[in-house]
Amino acid sequence: MSPRKTLATSHRVLAQLRHDPRTLALLFVVPPVLITILKYIFQNSRMFDSLAPMLLGIFPMVMMFLITSIATLRERTNGTLERLMTMPIGKVDFILGYAVAFSAVALLQASVAAGVMLGLLHVSVLGGTVPTLVGAVLSAFLGTSLGLFVSAFAATEFQAVQFMPAFIFPQLLTCGLFVPRGQMARFLQWLADIFPLTYSVDVMKQVTVHATWTGAATRDVLVVVGYAVAALLLGSLTIHRQE
């Protein structure tokens, strides 16, 4: 592993994103707009205040999963990855380079979305701004890691998008956003217990209802980080060195 090569990979990825206005709009405009729309859908402000923080544990993951899987797939299909693998750059450098780049984007995305939610929409979060940002950034990092891993199983960008309903929607339905997990069928509770999005949403729940950082929040953070690191390691195994 070489920090210089990792940072060079990150710089290249960020330079590509900077010249893609549609992707930038999807990352930084769509989540705040969706949260704002929900503000006016739920006229009951108490309902929105409880729902909005959980969405900060969902939107960053979904957006970063989509962007990362498509961007990495482009590297694979246009030959960029093969050319990189003929050079003296390790698979870990490549994966970490992407993870660092998209994590930086995730931090900015989470800051924008959280700023709109806490500042413009006046959502009350007992835990404060910093824990809210931590939860949102972890959600985005999880989406980045899963996107890097899943991109290996898609042959086209359309197939990468198709992973959304198959891979993300089951997690979205069982994470506790719509119905408390305790009220679901037992087998759905079991599924929720093994889905990483469940713990990302739980972090935001803890931040919303507790003024101080809790042990449950620490547990959820460790689970999310564990899933993200495992996905990065599995993603590195799908990259093959070219001679």
Image (cartoon, rainbow, N blue to C red):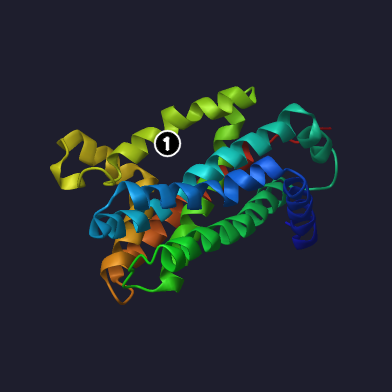
Give, as a three-letter code, the residue at label 1.
Answer: Ile
Q: Which residue corresponds to the image point at 67% horizontal and 37% vertical from the top-left?
A: 72
| Image position of 214 with respect to 225: above or below | below
Quarter holding the N terminus is bottom right
| Image position of 122 with respect to 42: above or below | below
Q: Is residue 204 visible?
A: yes
Residue 204 percent across, percent down from the top left = 35, 60
Residue 178 percent across, percent down from the top left = 25, 43
Q: Is residue 57 visible?
A: no
Residue 142 percent across, percent down from the top left = 49, 50
219 and 2: which is toward the camera: 219
The number of numbered discs placed on residues in the rendered structure image is: 1
Q: Which residue corresponds to the image point at 55% horizontal and 34% vertical from the top-left?
A: 150
Quarter holding the C terminus is top right
187 and 204: which is toward the camera: 204
Q: Which residue corresponds to the image point at 15% horizontal and 46% vertical from the top-left?
A: 182
Name the secondary structure under disc 1: helix
Kindly identify which residue carries mark 1: 168
Q: Is residue 167 left or right of residue 2?
A: left
Q: Mark 1, residues whose alpha carbon is within 10 Å: few (<14), some, or many (≥20)?
A: some
Residue 172 percent across, percent down from the top left = 35, 40
Q: Is residue 181 left or right of residue 225?
A: left
